[in-house]
Image (spheres, coloured by chain):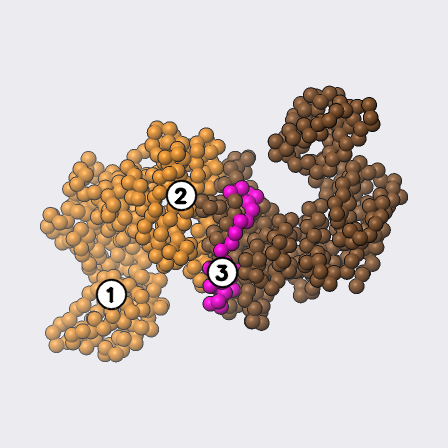
Chain colours: A brown, B orange
Amino acid sequence: MQKFGGTSVGSVDRIRNVAKRAVSAHARGDQVVVVVSAMSGETNRLLGLAREIVPVPDARELDVIASTGEQVTSALLALAIQSEGGKARSFLGHQVRILTDGAFTKARIRSIDDERLRKALAEGYIAVVAGFQGADDEGNITTLGRGGSDTSAVAVAAALKADVCEIYTDVDGVYTTDPNICPSARKISKISYEEMLELASLGAKVLQIRSVEIAMRHQVAVHVRSSFSDAEGTWVVAEDKGLEEVSVAGVAYDRGDACVQILGIDDKPGVAAELFGVIADNNVSVDMIVQSATPGERSELTFTMAKTDLERAKPIIEETAQRLGSKSIVYDTEVTKVSIVGLGMRSHAGIAAKMFRLLAGERINILAISTSEIKVSCLIPAKYTELAVRVLHDGFGLDVAKT
Amino acid sequence: MQKFGGTSVGSVDRIRNVAKRAVSAHARGDQVVVVVSAMSGETNRLLGLAREIVPVPDARELDVIASTGEQVTSALLALAIQSEGGKARSFLGHQVRILTDGAFTKARIRSIDDERLRKALAEGYIAVVAGFQGADDEGNITTLGRGGSDTSAVAVAAALKADVCEIYTDVDGVYTTDPNICPSARKISKISYEEMLELASLGAKVLQIRSVEIAMRHQVAVHVRSSFSDAEGTWVVAEDKGLEEVSVAGVAYDRGDACVQILGIDDKPGVAAELFGVIADNNVSVDMIVQSATPGERSELTFTMAKTDLERAKPIIEETAQRLGSKSIVYDTEVTKVSIVGLGMRSHAGIAAKMFRLLAGERINILAISTSEIKVSCLIPAKYTELAVRVLHDGFGLDVAKT
């Protein structure tokens, strides 16, 4: 199983390179399925056309339009494989019955009927599957959201019980943190599903979160690697496959959140429940939550949410805050969530404390904290983003190779 | 039922105009189905991409690529209708189960399951159907050949028993001949299926032949009209619907044929059968055939075929001609077939003779003749094309309005 992203199939020449890779894998005796994205820029061009017609297009029709990008690439790659002397057929989402729910533009895969693919593979074809797309149970075309081709690839690999799902991309693997802001970032050679899932959730963009969830559930070995070289990339595997126990595996950051502070709320039970109930009813997800209450005084509630939801959520927040007795709300969009992730936190004590100390050493103020079994996240002023990432990365020894 | 060609949906503004037309038809109380082509130029762009990969692309993959043009237009039009305040949904060929045979790039429709369309119409939707495409019984995407959206429209109209199938195009109807070479050509207000079928077969490009066949078989009233005005166009209807009996309804011409002359063949039975048997075995269609034999002398065989098949057919023709004793073959690609078409020929004698007289009056040499119940075709040197069309058009009184 091989998956190629948009830049890897961004031109006729690059499609030919992908074809050569598939043909040589097939020549080594492997059965080969290739999942492709749209040519880079194509999805944006198509969505642009739709938005020329109407600024907020109907999601069902958007998916009909957007899915053509992968449709074209899949057939072009099949042609390229044929011209390299291989046998190939393209398959669309509905043709390999990638059945999804009906949530247009962000559908989730429910099942894959692998019969047609297995038949093509048994007949010696290289199967080229259009990524990013499926169909709901009424036969409507659906798409899986940005990065959805990763999820297509892992889901097809799971259905076919493939030995490996190779994700070819324009970087050569998963890094300990973003090399653009931290020069000492290193490529990780192996990482667990759990850590990858946290890193992806916390801002690392190399894999779609959903694809890691599926890989973890079905134990698909994922190999993230460069489409422009033959070098080994990063293996995303189960925890027990010879992973070294490092305390921290990577540092992630996310600039996408806004911080909301509601001051002077009546200090009585059920206040938080009421506020977050109303917010959830409006389909807004809240992330970090901090409630500070000194007994007998008015309390304060701080939480984060996606910046893109903020304008929509403001009226709801303000109306509810007023009812709860608050006179003042502070919005702050100049914040960043920095996180450290590592399985080793389960057994190593003091990781969180060390993180706070490292940040304090640079006089970086922590606005909110949230933790899970294998990560610690701190909300900090956005201007310190790069500094915080570098000090945490090197402070936890990620700049030094472990193997 | 409305169908819009590529120039009618060639830009966002034009798509908006089409949407307005559909919405106002719906507001008048009609159930509306719109069939669309790809935006003009889009199909060529897509086929160009495929040919960049490989000069002669696999037909199955070509159809996967080419069908995206109509897919995008159908969803864009659905969005445009929504933004005009209408309810609309797009449907692809496989979603309305336009079942075809498996002849990629030139598939023929076998059946349409109208259930999903009827349901959408009953719920008040304007249904927008992607033209040109279907799916075979294995679910592979197929296309219906150039002009195939006409066929999609008429076939869907037949399945739904629509009152009328309006074909919106960039001309305002069917003309007595090509107005570009004959200034006195007039728009025909009504024409029979049979005549339209002959005109389309003989070179008139306004409707795909197959669409007229389906309209005739299912008695679908077809209205060919301009997408840029509200003027009445040409009705294509059954013979008995108040058509005036004119001797000649139109003049067509076709520059696409080549003439092959095989000289000095042994004059014995079965020669023609052998030659044309071999040619047919190689999937080359032959059109006009003239055999001239003076008893006791060697005979001569003249026939026409599509220019595009000539290079492929030459070795076969030459090998067979040699076996039949011929020493000389003359190929002529500078020929045109001019034809007159009219139901009135059935009852009016002397139409063919008048045609030959009109051509002879201009000293135009006739190379071959073929006739059917309602048409006469003459093969002439290509340089006389325009002259022949004009002299026939006016000679049969087509320059004078009949109603």
**Residue that mark 1 sits on:** B303
| Image point (78%, 26%), residue name | A299
Q: Name the residue located 27 percent from the left edge and 75 percent from the top edge.
A: B320
Judging from the image, mark 2 belongs to the subunit labelled B
Q: Secondary structure at mark 1?
A: strand
Q: Is residue A118 left or right of residue B358?
A: right
State the separation of the CA atoms marked 2 and 1: 41 Å
Q: CA distance from mark 2 to mark 3?
A: 29 Å
Closer to the camera, A310 or A190? A190
Residues in magenta, as a range: A102-128
Whether residue A165 appears in this view of the structure is yes
Q: Earlier in the sequence, mark 2 or mark 1?
A: 2
Q: Amino acid under label 1?
A: Phe
The residues tagged by marks 3 and 1 sit, at their Cα atoms, a distance apart of 48 Å
Q: Are marks 3 and 1 in contact (CB under 8 Å)?
A: no
Left or right position of B268 against A31: left
Residue labelled with disc 3: A117
Q: Regarding mark 3 in the picture, which secondary structure is present there?
A: helix
Residue B37 visible in the current orientation = no
Depth check: A331 or B248 in front?
A: A331
A168 shown above or below B130: below
Which residue carries the number 2 mark? B129
Residue A392, x across and y down, in percent: 82, 48
Residue closest to the far front: A269
Q: Nearer the viewer, mark 2 or mark 3?
A: 3
Q: Are marks 2 and 1 in contact (CB under 8 Å)?
A: no
Q: Look at discs 3 and 1 and give the one toward the viewer.
A: 3
Magenta-drawn stretch contains B92:
no
* Residue located at (67% from left, 64% from top): A229
Packing grade of label 1 (10 A; few <14, some 14-19, many >=20) is: some
Give the vertical position of B334 relative to B76 (above or below).
below
